[in-house]
Image (spheres, rainbow, N blue to C red):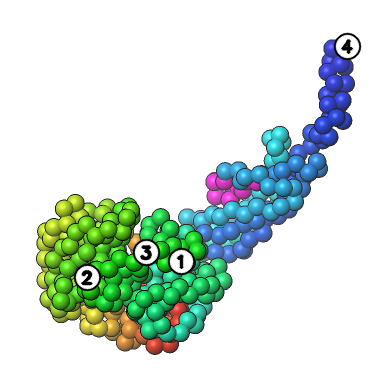
């Protein structure tokens, strides 16, 4: 008994000397966040509380669907913490937060914040914002983090940087001569800009500074694509060259030149990096290039003016837009055979898919709309009116939005959920 009392006295003395209250953080307030959302989209929730002894606090969230987040990093007492989550099923979920201090003492779980997750259409289907940019927007790509969108603006020789959180233009990067295509490096550190008739400019995304230019022999460079590992960048050069230039990105050196069909206007790479496909406008073909040795291994006849080309995320099919004509064609990559055709809007140009590959968005420059194709059966399930002259599309990495550049109204339409 005396020994136990001695330990208690020692403990109280230590508390007095160190100021440690041995009390856990207070129960967090109900988290703040949206009250409704859609399947598969990321949503942010924020929690905050205080510690009786002003100890640093870490937070975690119970998302109500059987998943509990990892602990956040420690922040000062009273400082909010934010985490993101996406739900895979429709329903109502109560999001709760818990806090712990640096001694590992935990609070009770907070009251729940209810969010109702809807099925809706399963894909963004309405214009929710329009971003004026001026000039002649010609291509668009989204940063892998989703924080920024990059737009090549041909007539004013600049790349426009849009912050996606508030759809604000935050930078205009001057480049030389007619930026034609913009492609974000898979690691997000650089944007490669393909110029109509010049070569490639490399922009560092951390400060939006031009850090390199890569001449390509005066060829009329029209399109570019990265291999998914980011080690190589492939540039399509139309007439008179009719080649693909292979650039090693570690030192921006040209390592190969591959003859393809006449006037390659579109280029895409399979997700496994094994092959690139070029749409050759003047020869009416698609060239298939094996990347291991930069050799053309197949030529697929597709008819007049293949202008844009896009590989689905599963790598099983490639879509070919035949520049201002209809229909869209589908190539099965296992045997490089045309297996389907899809009637979309008039003037089909740029294409891109949501990250999961369930839907493809096609910009139709003549009908001023975007066709949404369900890839499971190649059916057009929606037509979304946008600005005048839609030319290219880029999805947000979380699949919640699609960005469309409109050449004639000189703006960007943001397609999302309304």
At horizontal 14% and vertical 67% (from top left) the residue drawn is: 260
Q: Position of residue 411 (x, y in %)?
A: 45, 82
Q: Residues within 10 Å of mark 3 (few under 14, many from 20)?
A: some
Q: Is residue 61 magenta?
A: yes
Query: Under tag 3, what secondary structure?
Result: strand
Q: Which residues are magenta?
A: 59-69
Residue under numbered circle 1: 209
- Disc 4 versus disc 3: distance between alpha carbons? 77 Å
Tell me which corner region of the image, top left, top right, bottom left or bottom right, holds residue 253.
bottom left
Query: Under tag 2, what secondary structure?
Result: loop
Q: Position of residue 282 (x, y in %)?
A: 15, 78
Q: Earlier in the sequence, mark 4 or mark 3?
A: 4
Determine contact: label 4, label 1, CB under 8 Å.
Answer: no
Give me the disc on residue 212.
3
Residue under numbered circle 4: 2
At horizontal 12% and vertical 76% (from top left) the residue drawn is: 283
At horizontal 31% and vertical 74% (from top left) the residue drawn is: 195
In the rendered image, the quadrant that contains the N terminus is: top right
Q: Residues within 10 Å of mark 2 (few under 14, many from 20)?
A: few
Whether residue 388 sits left or right of residue 114 in the image: it is: left
- Disc 3 versus disc 1: distance between alpha carbons? 9 Å
Q: Earlier in the sequence, mark 4 or mark 1?
A: 4
Q: Earlier in the sequence, mark 4 or mark 2?
A: 4
Q: Which mark lies nearer to you, 4 or 3?
A: 3
Magenta span: predominant SS is loop
Residue under numbered circle 2: 217
Query: Under tag 1, what secondary structure?
Result: strand
């Amino acid at each position: 008994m005396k020994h136990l009392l001695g330990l208690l006295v020692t403990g109280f003395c230590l508390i007095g000397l160190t100021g440690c209250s041995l009390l856990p953080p207070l129960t967090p307030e109900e988290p703040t966040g949206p009250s409704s959302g859609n399947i598969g989209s990321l949503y942010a929730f924020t929690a905050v509380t205080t510690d009786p002894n002003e100890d640093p606090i870490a937070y975690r969230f119970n998302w109500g669907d059987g998943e509990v987040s990892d602990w956040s990093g420690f922040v000062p007492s009273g400082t909010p913490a934010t985490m993101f989550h996406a739900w895979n099923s429709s329903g109502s979920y109560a999001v709760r937060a818990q806090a712990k201090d640096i001694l590992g003492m935990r609070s009770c779980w907070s009251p729940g914040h209810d969010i109702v997750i809807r099925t809706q259409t399963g894909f963004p289907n309405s214009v929710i914002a329009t971003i004026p940019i001026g000039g002649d927007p010609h291509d668009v790509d989204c940063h892998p983090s989703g924080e920024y969108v990059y737009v090549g603006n041909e007539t004013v020789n600049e790349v426009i940087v849009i912050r996606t959180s508030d759809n604000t233009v935050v930078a205009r990067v001057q480049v030389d001569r007619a930026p034609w295509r913009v492609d974000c490096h898979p690691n997000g550190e650089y944007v490669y800009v393909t110029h109509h008739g010049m070569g490639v400019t490399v922009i560092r995304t951390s400060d939006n500074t031009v850090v390199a230019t890569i001449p390509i022999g005066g060829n009329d460079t029209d399109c570019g694509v990265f291999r998914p590992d980011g080690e190589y960048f492939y540039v399509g050069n139309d007439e008179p060259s009719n080649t693909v230039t292979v650039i090693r990105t570690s030192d921006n050196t040209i390592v190969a030149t591959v003859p393809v069909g006449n006037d390659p206007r579109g280029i895409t790479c399979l997700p496994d990096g094994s092959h690139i496909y070029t749409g050759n406008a003047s020869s009416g073909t698609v060239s298939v290039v094996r990347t291991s040795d930069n050799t053309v291994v197949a030529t697929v006849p597709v008819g007049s003016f293949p202008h844009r080309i896009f590989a689905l995320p599963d790598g099983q099919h490639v879509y070919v837009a035949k520049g201002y004509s209809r229909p869209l064609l589908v190539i099965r990559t296992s045997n490089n055979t045309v297996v389907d055709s899809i009637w979309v809007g008039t003037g089909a140009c740029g294409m891109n898919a949501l990250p999961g590959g369930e839907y493809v968005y096609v910009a139709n420059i003549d009908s001023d709309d975007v066709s949404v194709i369900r890839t499971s059966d190649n059916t057009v399930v929606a037509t979304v009116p946008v600005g005048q002259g839609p030319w290219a599309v880029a999805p947000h990495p979380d699949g919640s939005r699609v960005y469309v550049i409109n050449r004639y109204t000189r703006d960007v339409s943001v397609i999302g959920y309304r």
